[in-house]
Image: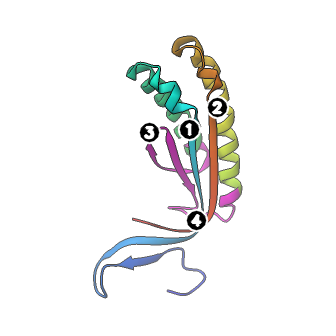
């Protein structure tokens, strides 16, 4: 409904169709990707690329769980997460900024640690983070 107390609004197929998605009016989304990843990965074996991404995403997932952040997906070297859904969080933007800061710190630590096993240039990788607050549709 239009009541301000409504957490999400169902988006339906047709007038009488079942809900296929929900509108979450107050969220913050984070997109993070690895700066220098394409060049770095072109000089590595696939198993090394996997080791970097697996170690990184494992840490981000743990941090997300502890922070009240929902991981949406990973697409290659891009990590997508959201605060404010499925459970509403009035301070979703602050939660996500703190999560992003933790991810940046973890990335810096991990890239230095992994340089020993994954080779020179690993510690030179960077993490780009973008945040956006507003409504999203999820389903």
User: Which callout, 4 or 2, points to the residue nearer the camera?
Assistant: 2
Q: CA distance from mark 4 to mark 1?
A: 21 Å
Q: CA distance from mark 1 to mark 3?
A: 14 Å
Name the residue tied to disc 2: 106
Q: Earlier in the sequence, mark 1 or mark 3?
A: 1
Q: Secondary structure at mark 4?
A: loop
How crowded pointer 3 is (Cα within 10 Å; few <14, some 14-19, many 20+) is rated as: few
Q: Earlier in the sequence, mark 4 or mark 3?
A: 3
User: Does 51 sit above or below residue 61?
Assistant: above
Question: Is the C-beta separation of discs 1 and 2 under 8 Å?
Answer: yes
User: Does 60 sit above or below residue 10?
Assistant: above
User: Does 96 sit above or below residue 127?
Assistant: below
Q: Earlier in the sequence, mark 1 or mark 2?
A: 1
Name the residue tied to disc 3: 76
Q: State which region is magenta.
A: 65-93
How crowded pointer 1 is (Cα within 10 Å; few <14, some 14-19, many 20+) is rated as: many
Q: Secondary structure at mark 2?
A: helix
Name the residue tied to disc 1: 60
Residue at the image position 42 percent from the left and 77 percent from the top: 10
User: Which callout, 4 or 1, points to the residue nearer the camera?
Assistant: 1
Residue at the image position 56 percent from the left and 38 percent from the top: 60
Name the residue tied to disc 4: 88
């Amino acid at each position: 409904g239009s009541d301000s107390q409504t957490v999400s609004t169902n988006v339906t197929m047709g007038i009488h169709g079942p809900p296929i998605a929900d509108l979450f009016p107050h969220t913050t989304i984070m997109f993070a990707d690895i700066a220098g990843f394409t060049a770095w990965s072109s000089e590595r074996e696939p198993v090394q690329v996997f080791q970097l991404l697996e170690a990184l995403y494992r840490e981000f997932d743990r941090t997300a769980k502890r922070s009240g952040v929902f991981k949406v997906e990973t697409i290659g070297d891009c990590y997508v997460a959201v605060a404010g859904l499925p459970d509403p969080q009035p301070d979703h933007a602050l939660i996500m900024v703190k999560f992003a800061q933790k991810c940046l710190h973890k990335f810096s630590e991990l890239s230095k640690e992994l340089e020993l096993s994954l080779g020179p240039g690993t510690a030179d990788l960077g993490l780009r983070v973008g945040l956006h607050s507003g409504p999203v549709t999820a389903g």
